[in-house]
Image (tube, rainbow, N blue to C red):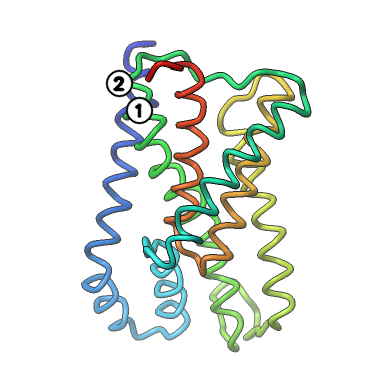
Amino acid sequence: MDFWMTYLNRWLIPLFLTSLTFYFHFKKDEIRKKIEKFKNITRRDFCLNLLDGFALRFDDWRYTLFVPILAAVALDLLVSWAFQLPLRSMGEPLITALTTSGFLNAVGEEFLVRGLLLGMFLAFLLTLRKKSKFHFLKKPVQISESTYHTASIILVVLTGLVFSISHGNFTFYQFAIRFVNGVLFGVLYLLAGRNLLPAIVAHGAGNWLLILIDNPHF
């Protein structure tokens, strides 16, 4: 059982989610054309907004690469200093750590947590920015710009909480460092216009920091 759970959690699920990430990226135009044929306007708008949340755009390198890397590394070091505890990786072999934590987990988890979970709620809110009627609402609803931004911030915090809890934390330090990272990834996602790439870069940078610390001669 441990053998299969190890491969399922560390390899198969991350590989599947990473594949989905790139599928939506390379097939987005085809998917968009199919969605635009939906007759239900609310359903069409929601699906288009959700699809836009899976974007992998390489915009200005300063905000796509430099700022996410700097923010992730600085935040991990700050939390480590605040708790006076060292940063540690999972102690995996180097090639395994680089492939899973360094790439597959960074891409797959951001697709799942920021792109799908956070993106789904943001797509709902974005759809409601113009008067829309979902089947579970009694009447059409329209929210203001300020309501959207306030709700977005709350959702970033909540998904950061989900992100941390889903890792099965054993200490408050582990919970805290994953929670603040989850919030950081969500903020980067929002500031980039629901672009997953800065969040993926930051997630990968934080994981690479742990790998480099455990492999100082790498």
| Residue 50 picture quarter | bottom left
Amino acid type of disc 2? Ile
Residue holding disc 2: 95
- The C terminus appears in which quarter of the rendering? top left
Q: Is residue 31 above or below residue 138?
A: above
Residue pictured at 35% horizontal, 86% vertical: 39
Question: Residue 84 at what x, y percent from top left?
Answer: 76, 20
| In front of the other: 161 or 137 | 161
| Residue 9 picture quarter | top left
Residue pictured at 60% horizontal, 72% vertical: 125
3D distance between C-alphas at marks 1 and 2: 5 Å
| In front of the other: 67 or 43 | 67
Tell me: 108 left or right of 71: left
Tell me: 214 left or right of 160: left
Q: Which mark is on residue 122? A: none
- The N terminus appears in which quarter of the rendering? top left
| In front of the other: 41 or 153 | 153
Q: Tag 2's secondary structure?
A: helix
Residue pictured at 43% horizontal, 77% vertical: 43
In this figure, what is the number of numbered marks? 2
Q: Tag 1's secondary structure?
A: helix
Residue pictured at 31% horizontal, 82% vertical: 36
Question: Residue 195 at what x, y percent from top left?
Answer: 45, 63
Residue holding disc 1: 98
Amino acid type of disc 1? Leu
